[in-house]
Structure formats: structure tokens, C-alpha cells
């Protein structure tokens, strides 16, 4: 059924709100072959200047015939807007092309007026790698603070949120600024959303459509972490995307997103009774390249059986390349249909597994710029990969077409490679990016660099001021062996700020690196696995990410992998004996020493990293303190309260009621005690009650004195009629098992 004249007029008003600046234009700047997008006759300066008849004719065009508009053939509702490739700002608004588009793929593309329904067959599932010198990656990670916003650029048109029938929306390459409006996020039928190459900012938006197939937010200034339950791993939560069953393309590349990739653990959608999970089974293209993601590559990528392109390049990922990528995972596992695998420019370690050669469709594999050792397996060399980027069939037939070998320099990390036989081990990794060979650094040079990078001239104790080029063993805080090699660096609470440089991994005799309570930033370098460390302390710093997995299995660091003498053989679980927590408490946890520690003797508990949700613990590893909000001994996630206080109000009210009830009961008992003649027993009880009333709010149990504390049975008071003696008992709830409901 066709739309009524009134509905047609309302839709035109919504669309014309996008080109409101044209109302005061003295001429009609929109090209003649563009249909529609004009205001009615007499309402603009252009129509009053003599173009009224032409403009009115364009206005009267049915909205479904306007350029870039697609409609449902049955009811005439608008289902798509193709205003991308600069069509909105350049053609409709007459603004000049954005300078930021100069390096974008393909440059400025002329807008083609195709029906939006054809997008189903035109989803781009291929990515091109560009040389490091290319302008497209000069601004590889764009965040809101990188470049001052251009005030002349338009903001995202929120009026489009009124078109609730909208299924496809393309606003790419339009210099749009600001955030994505809530009205757009709430569109119920959205299937394709493309805003690549704009200046949009904000955190990840939670679209409400369960039909979303393409989500492309690449090349903007978005930032922040992705919610832990976004993909339903490990559980389905309030921020789990409703479109996981339909999603085909997910592209957040070239932004400032950080944190870990939320795909750890078994999916909350997992059903052991079915062969495959439905979640993300249609996913073919997953791109998080050129961001600030840290942590490891999740094994769960092996679950996405239709994945053709996985792009995680230019992040801060550590650990090894999981075997699930070429083996698949879950029931009925088989190799993924990957065509492109981009992992270059991270901090991945380990070796390159020849199992990658079993990927049947693989055409491009990039692993250069990591911390991989060993050689490229021969089966991979025979696949003739990367010929498009190398622009050389001959190079693609060699191993260095995948990655240059160790002790080589290469601008791109792949062929052509320059051997560096006398570099002192400086080029210890495969595919190391370097334009020329260079020798290794001396220990003096390494300490000079460390002093510079940690702002040594601002250290709190000036007696630690290291003179550049001075002998290593004469520097305060540094100890050496008889051969003059650095064995110990101790710089506690000196205000060091800056990164832990990877060059520390070249101090071949370093055993102790003691740097607690400073302002160190960045990431823990996996290069430390090459030195004989037995003590590493970074507690109280601002180091992000995770402990590199190869460092987690390094024996000797903080007792890692060594059974304490007081513990009998087999008494310690292997996962505790070798654990990342022995190096530093992971983000979201803390302990008094900033790491875990094995028990010294049988029957002891040792030190564990306990959950903590304050801002510092959320972002940084090795926390030694926790400053969460606590009510009656319960930890409350301050971040969750900020994000959804309304959801927390019922819990807070319940806790407040318990607190009030406890105080009332204490008050009545105290009044009763003061009105009763005091004998020996009552005097004792009176002293006990006086002590209770002066203490902070605590939880109380009513049970016999010698009863064991029941974790599931506690109240805020007691009843004298129960015939039991009240026992003052401050209940410390286990922090590994929060009593708070999932709403906060």
C-alpha cells in the first residue's frame, strides 16, 4: 500500500533536515542529475532567485525516486539510504572533499546510484595491505584527541532515527563529527551500518537490531573497551549484542579501542546437545586492526566456521598464535576457510606453526613485526602466499615472502631482506622491521635508554641521578657480578614514569628487577623471558595488558614453577605452580604484594589475587590495593554504578535497610542493658555491647559460639527467643563469590 500524501511529506521533511544549510543558498548547488533533495518552491533563496520551477519539480519527485533512497516495493517505506563515499557532504551539501580521505582505499569514489537492496551481494570481504610508507596507515590509530575537530563539518543526522523502517544506512567518507545518536542505535530493523572514514567518536554503541549483518565503524575516533559480554563470552549479559546470529562483517579497524578482545571462555550460547553454536556462525569478516587491543588471541576464533578474514594487525597482542585458528575448535572441528590472516605488528611470541599450511583457502598470511623466533615452516613457503602485496611471484615462492628470517633487516618485515650477521643479536626475531642493520646495544646504552624513557631527571631521589655514559656498576640502584654485568636493578618508589623498555631483555645476567610503587606504563615486555630473572616486582605501577604467556611459563621468576621445600611432591596444582599470577596479578584483581605466591608449607594458603573492580585494578596489572566502594563488607563495582545506577538502587536500599535494622537492634540492646542492674555477666555483656556500638557497621550472626560460620546463613540481627548467645562475628564475604546480583 502506497504512503499517504501526509506521510510522504513527513518523510521528505526528515530527509530535508539533512540538507538544511541549502535552504539559504542563493543557487541550487546540487547537480541536475541528482533527483530530489530540494526544498519546496518559495522556501529557499534559490527558488526566489528564479530557480523555483526547477526546484519545485525536484521536490515533487516521490521520495522513493530521490537519489540514494531505496524503498520497500510493497508499502513504500524507506528501507535504505546510500549517502556514502562523500555523497552527503560533497554532492548534497557542496562541501569540499576531506583531506583525510586522500589516503583512503580507492581515494574519492564517484557516488553510484544503485538500489540499496543490491548491498546484500556487495559486502566487501577482502582487505588490502599497504606498505608502511603509505598514507593510508600514516594515521593508523585515530582517536578523539589526535586532531582538533573541524567545526565546519556536519554532525551525525539524528533525524534519521525517525525512519524506523530503515534497514541499510551508508554514510561513509562524509567528515561526520560527534557521536552516533541514540535514535540511530535504536533502529529496530537495521541490517547494514557503514560509517567508515569519518570523524565520529565515543565508545562502542549497542545497536538494538537483531538483524544487523554489516557493522563498519572503521577509520573514526572511537575509543574505550568492548564490554566483556558483547559477544556472549563467557556469559550472556545486559550488553550482549542481539545480532550475533546474523552478523557477517564486523569492522572496528583504525580507531582507538583498547582492552582485551572479549571472546574468552565458553559462549553463553553454548549448547552441548547441538554440534555447532549458532552465535557468530555467519561471521565472515572480523577486523580489529590498528587499535590498542591487548591480551592474547582467543581460541574461540576457531569456533567461527565461516570466517574468511581475520585482521588483528597493529595492536598490542601477546602470546602465541592459537592452534584453533587452523584446527578449528568445538564439536566437529575442521580448518577454518580463512583467506586472509593479518597478525603483523603485535608482540606475538613463540614459533610459526606449520599447521597454518592446512588452511585450504589461505592466500595471505602476515606475521612480521612480532616477537616470533625460529623459521618459517617449509609447507607454508610452498603455498606462494602474499603475492599481491609482494608484487613478485618469485618472492611469494620463498619463505621470506611470509617473514624475513632472524638476524635480518627489512622495512616491511618481508622480502626483500638484508642479512645482519654482526648485529649482536639485535635482530633476534623473525620479520623484524628495520630499514638497516645495526649492532646490539651495550649495557651502558641500555641503562641510559631506560633512564631517559622513565624520565630519570624527574626521579624523586636525586641521588639516583644516572649520568649518561657512566659505568653501569657505579649507578645507584644497580648491582653487578664480578664480570661487571648487571644482575640487579632496584628502584623502589622513585616516581619512574614511562614504559618498561624491551631492551632490558638484552641484560643477559639480570636476575632482579625490583620496580614497585612507580608510575610505569605500557606493557610488560616478553623479551624478559630471555634473561635469568628470579625476582620481578612491578606492583603499584600502571602497566597494562596481560603477562606474556611465555613469561608465565618461565621457571624461577618469583618462584614460578618451583615447588617450595616445605610442600610435598604433587601437593601443588600444576596450574598454580606455573601461573601468570605468580608474575603479577591480572587486571581486575589485587593482592598485598601485587602478585600471587605459593604456600611455603603444607596446610598454608599462600597469597592469591582477589577480585577488585576499582578503576586502577580494571586497567592495570599488579595492583596491591583495592579501593572499591564497600557496603557491609560487600564490594560494589563503581564503574557499573556509574553506567547504570538505577539498576543498583534496589541493592543499595536492601543494604541500607539491613544497616538500619542492625543499628536499631543494637540501640535497643544497649538501652535494655543500661536499665538492668549489672551483675558480673551483664557487665561483661555491657562492655561487649559498648564495643559493638562504637565499631563500623558489621554483619551479625546468631549461632552457638562453637558453630562453624555458614557462608549461606547470615542476618543483620538475632532473636533472644532462639535461646542462643549472640556472638560478635564480622563476616568477611569471599571475594571470589560476590553476593551482589548481576545487575550491578
Image (cartoon, helix red, strand yellow):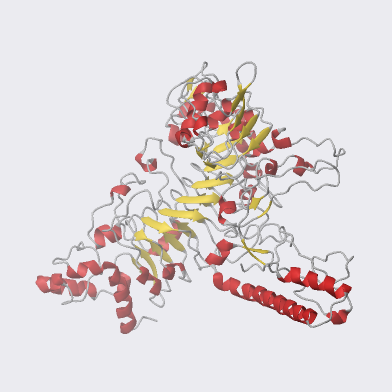
**Is residue 714 visible to us here?**
no
Describe residue 475's horizontal placement relative to residue 233 as left or right. Answer: left
**Along the line of sight, which residue is nearer the eye, 697 or 354?**
697
Describe residue 53's horizontal placement relative to residue 430 as left or right. Answer: left
Give residue 285's position: percent from left, percent from top. 51, 51
Give residue 313's position: percent from left, percent from top. 50, 42
Q: Is residue 667 above or below residue 174?
A: below
Q: How many marks?
A: 0
Describe residue 216's horizontal placement relative to residue 298 as left or right. Answer: left
Q: Is residue 591 above or below residue 437?
A: below
**Along the line of sight, which residue is nearer the eye, 538 or 412?**
538
Q: Is residue 388 above or below residue 16?
A: above
Quadrant containing the N terminus is bottom left
Residue 131: image quadrant is top left
Give residue 96's position: percent from left, percent from top. 23, 54
Which residue is at a point 29% across and 68% down the rendered structure image? Answer: 18
Give residue 183's position: percent from left, percent from top. 42, 71
**Is residue 387 visible to us here?**
yes
Describe residue 109's horizontal placement relative to residue 470 as left or right. Answer: left
> In the orientation shown, which residue stands out farthest toward the left?
50
Residue 82: image quadrant is bottom left
**Along the line of sight, which residue is nearer the eye, 96 or 146?**
146
Quadrant containing the C terminus is bottom right
Amino acid at each position: 500500500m502506497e504512503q499517504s500524501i501526509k506521510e510522504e511529506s513527513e518523510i521528505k521533511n526528515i530527509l530535508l533536515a539533512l540538507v538544511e544549510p541549502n535552504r539559504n543558498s542563493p543557487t541550487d548547488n546540487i547537480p541536475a542529475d541528482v533527483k530530489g533533495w530540494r526544498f519546496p518552491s518559495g522556501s529557499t533563496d534559490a527558488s526566489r532567485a528564479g530557480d523555483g520551477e526547477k526546484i519545485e519539480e525536484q521536490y515533487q519527485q516521490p521520495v522513493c525516486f530521490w537519489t540514494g533512497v531505496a524503498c520497500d516495493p510493497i508499502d513504500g517505506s524507506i528501507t535504505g539510504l546510500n549517502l556514502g563515499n562523500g555523497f552527503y557532504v560533497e554532492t548534497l551539501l557542496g562541501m569540499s572533499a576531506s583531506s583525510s580521505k586522500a589516503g583512503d582505499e580507492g581515494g574519492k569514489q564517484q557516488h553510484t546510484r544503485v538500489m540499496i537492496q543490491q548491498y546484500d551481494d556487495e559486502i566487501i570481504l577482502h582487505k588490502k595491505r599497504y606498505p608502511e610508507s603509505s598514507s593510508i596507515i600514516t594515521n593508523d590509530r585515530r582517536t578523539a584527541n589526535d586532531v582538533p575537530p573541524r567545526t565546519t563539518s556536519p554532525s551525525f543526522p539524528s533525524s534519521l532515527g525517525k525512519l524506523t523502517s530503515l534497514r541499510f544506512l551508508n554514510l561513509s567518507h562524509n567528515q561526520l563529527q560527534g557521536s552516533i545518536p541514540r535514535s540511530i542505535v535504536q533502529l529496530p530493523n537495521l541490517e547494514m551500518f557503514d560509517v567508515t572514514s569519518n570523524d565520529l567518536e565515543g565508545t562502542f554503541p549497542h545497536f538494538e537490531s537483531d538483524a544487523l549483518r554489516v557493522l563498519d565503524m572503521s577509520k573514526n575516533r572511537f575509543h574505550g573497551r568492548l564490554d566483556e559480554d558483547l559477544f556472549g563470552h563467557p556469559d550472556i549479559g545486559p550488553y550482549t549484542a542481539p545480532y550475533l546470529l546474523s552478523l557477517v562483517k564486523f569492522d572496528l579497524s583504525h580507531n582507538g579501542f583498547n582492552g582485551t578482545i572479549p571472546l574468552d571462555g565458553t559462549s553463553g550460547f553454548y549448547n552441548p546437545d547441538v554440534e555447532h553454536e549458532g552465535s557468530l556462525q555467519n561471521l565472515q569478516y572480523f577486523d580489529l586492526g590498528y587499535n590498542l587491543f591487548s591480551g592474547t588471541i582467543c581460541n574461540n576464533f576457531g569456533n567461527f566456521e565461516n570466517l574468511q578474514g581475520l585482521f588483528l594487525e597493529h595492536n598490542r597482542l601477546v602470546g602465541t598464535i592459537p592452534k584453533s585458528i587452523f584446527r578449528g575448535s568445538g564439536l566437529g572441528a575442521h580448518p577454518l576457510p580463512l583467506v586472509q590472516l593479518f597478525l603483523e605488528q603485535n608482540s606475538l611470541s613463540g614459533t610459526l606453526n606449520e599447521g597454518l599450511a592446512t588452511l585450504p583457502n589461505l592466500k595471505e598470511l602476515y606475521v612480521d613485526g612480532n616477537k616470533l623466533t625460529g623459521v618459517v615452516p617449509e609447507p607454508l613457503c610452498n603455498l606462494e602466499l602474499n603475492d599481491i602485496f609482494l608484487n613478485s611471484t618469485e618472492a611469494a615462492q620463498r619463505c621470506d615472502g611470509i617473514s624475513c628470517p632472524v638476524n635480518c633487516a627489512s622495512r616491511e618485515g618481508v622480502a626483500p631482506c638484508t642479512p645482519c650477521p654482526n648485529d649482536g643479536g639485535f635482530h633476534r626475531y623473525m620479520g623484524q622491521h628495520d630499514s638497516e642493520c645495526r649492532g646490539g646495544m651495550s649495557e651502558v646504552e641500555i641503562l641510559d635508554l631506560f633512564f631517559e624513557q622513565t624520565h630519570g631527571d624527574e626521579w624523586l631521589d636525586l641521588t639516583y641521578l644516572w649520568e649518561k655514559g657512566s659505568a653501569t656498576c657505579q649507578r645507584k640502584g644497580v648491582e653487578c657480578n664480578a664480570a661487571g654485568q648487571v644482575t640487579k636493578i632496584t628502584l623502589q618508589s622513585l616516581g619512574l614514569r614511562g614504559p618498561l623498555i624491551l631492551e632490558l631483555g638484552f641484560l643477559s645476567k639480570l636476575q632482579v628487577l625490583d620496580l614497585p610503587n612507580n608510575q610505569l606504563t605500557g606493557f610488560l615486555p616478553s623479551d624478559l623471558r630471555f634473561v635469568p630473572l628470579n625476582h620481578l616486582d612491578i606492583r603499584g605501577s600502571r602497566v597494562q595488558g596481560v603477562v606474556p604467556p611465555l613469561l608465565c611459563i618461565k621457571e624461577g621468576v618469583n618462584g614460578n614453577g618451583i615447588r617450595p621445600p616445605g610442600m610435598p611432591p604433587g601437593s601443588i596444582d600444576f596450574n598454580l605452580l606455573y601461573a601468570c599470577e605468580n608474575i603479577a596479578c591480572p587486571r581486575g584483581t589485587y593482592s598485598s604484594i601485587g602478585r600471587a605466591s605459593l604456600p611455603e608449607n603444607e596446610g598454608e594458603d599462600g597469597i592469591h589475587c582477589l577480585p577488585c573492580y576499582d578503576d586502577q585494578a580494571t586497567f592495570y596489572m599488579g595492583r596491591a590495593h583495592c579501593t572499591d566502594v564497600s557496603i557491609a563488607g560487600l564490594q560494589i563495582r563503581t564503574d557499573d554504578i556509574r553506567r547504570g545506577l538505577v539498576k543498583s538502587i534496589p541493592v543499595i536500599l536492601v543494604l541500607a535497610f539491613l544497616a538500619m535494622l542492625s543499628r536499631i537492634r543494637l540501640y535497643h540492646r544497649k538501652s535494655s542493658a543500661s536499665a538492668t542492674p549489672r551483675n558480673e555477666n551483664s557487665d561483661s555483656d555491657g562492655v561487649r555491647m559498648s564495643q559493638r556500638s562504637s565499631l563500623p557497621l558489621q554483619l551479625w550472626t546468631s549461632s552457638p559460639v562453637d558453630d562453624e560460620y555458614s557462608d549461606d546463613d547470615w542476618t543483620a540481627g538475632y532473636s533472644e527467643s532462639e535461646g542462643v548467645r549472640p556472638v560478635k562475628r564480622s563476616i568477611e564475604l569471599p571475594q571470589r563469590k560476590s553476593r551482589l546480583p548481576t545487575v550491578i
